[in-house]
Image (cartoon, rainbow, N blue to C red):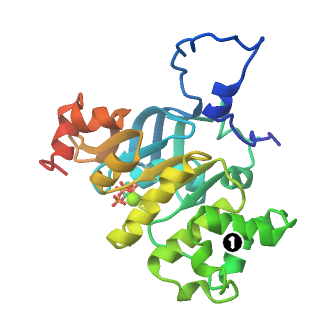
Amino acid sequence: MTIIPTGSRSMSEVWTTRSGPEPVEQAEPEQPELAPEIVFEVRNLAVKYGSAVAVRDITLDIASNEITAVIGPSGCGKSTFIRCLNRMNDLVPGARVEGLVRYHGEDLYDPKVDPAQVRRRIGMVFQRPNPFPKSIYDNVAYGPRINKMRRNMDETVERALSQAALWDEVKDKLKRSALALSGGQQQRLCIARALAVQPDVLLMDEPCSALDPIATARIEDLMEELKRDYTIVIVTHNMQQAARVSDRTAFLTTEVDDSGRRSGRLVEFDRTATIFTHPSDPRTEGYITGRFG
Ligand SMILES: Nc1ncnc2c1ncn2[C@@H]1O[C@H](COP(=O)(O)OP(=O)(O)OP(=O)(O)O)[C@@H](O)[C@H]1O
Ligand SMILES: [Mg+2]
């Protein structure tokens, strides 16, 4: 079995790597801007469901310790695309993935790669909070248990709940049912459950669309915290959210061919500030200004 790399060097590690003796009493030399480490290289990706092409022509790089947002109208293939990044489409009957997805330089779809291992390294949070009908503790411990990470389970559970900014609210009721939590708390629990197996990447498919503005703001703050340690890809319908939280944005849209067949494709991918202020494609501008989609 191919071993998926267990982590990436953070930018702070890159910056603090030194060689040679310390300079004495010298002005700091200007640091050249380092290119970010690339976690995913996606090349000419297409996904078909039977004979229908759901999404095609996706070529982009996803950088480490950044938040990448995926936006676009309903049905353009955002969920289909994000599911390619941890091989969740393997579980969808009839789905076929073409093109290339490299994860830390390794072909994610190579037959030697173990999809279960991929999903441990690349966790996912869905639109509707989906806690298991178990206790809060058992929800978070679930992943570590099935991955045989049984050591220091109490610590693992506390760390994941703290990272998901939920610990203080639940530390006195860990044995209570997760289903008794509010929607926003359930979503943070699902984030804790994803973090408990110590992933490298967190994929979030509209994680706030079932939440009120206060719970949404908490999740957005949390994402900002988490990107120090994780690479995050978020699908969102909320353009303000994409503009607020993400570093780069991919805009997908639906095209209809002469025979009326619809398929999604990537229109533009750039730094979020550029997408929202100087998009290079008129379709992006039309979408973000609300004139289309
Ligand atoms: N399991 C499936 N089987 C067949 N077709 C599917 C399946 N899942 C999605 N599709 C089709 O693929 C296309 C893209 O769907 P997808 O769910 O990826 O869009 P989306 O951009 O996430 O939409 P939304 O914003 O509504 O969530 C749609 O035409 C959809 O009908
Ligand atoms: Mg979707």
Q: Is residue 85 above or below residue 237?
A: above
What residue sits 34% from the left and 49% below the top? 244
Q: Is residue 62 above or below residue 133?
A: above
* Outermost residue, front side: 25
Q: Secondary structure at mark 1?
A: helix
What residue sits 65% from the left and 60% below the top? 195
Residue occupied by mark 1: 140
Q: Position of residue 14 (x, y in %)?
A: 66, 27
Tell me which amino acid carries mark 1. Val
Name the foreground residue: 2 vs 236.
236
Residue 287, by quadrant, is top left
What residue sits 57% from the left and 53% below the top? 202
Q: Position of residue 16 (x, y in %)?
A: 68, 27
* Outermost residue, right side: 151
Name the foreground residue: 133 vs 271.
271
Q: Position of residue 107 (x, y in %)?
A: 66, 34
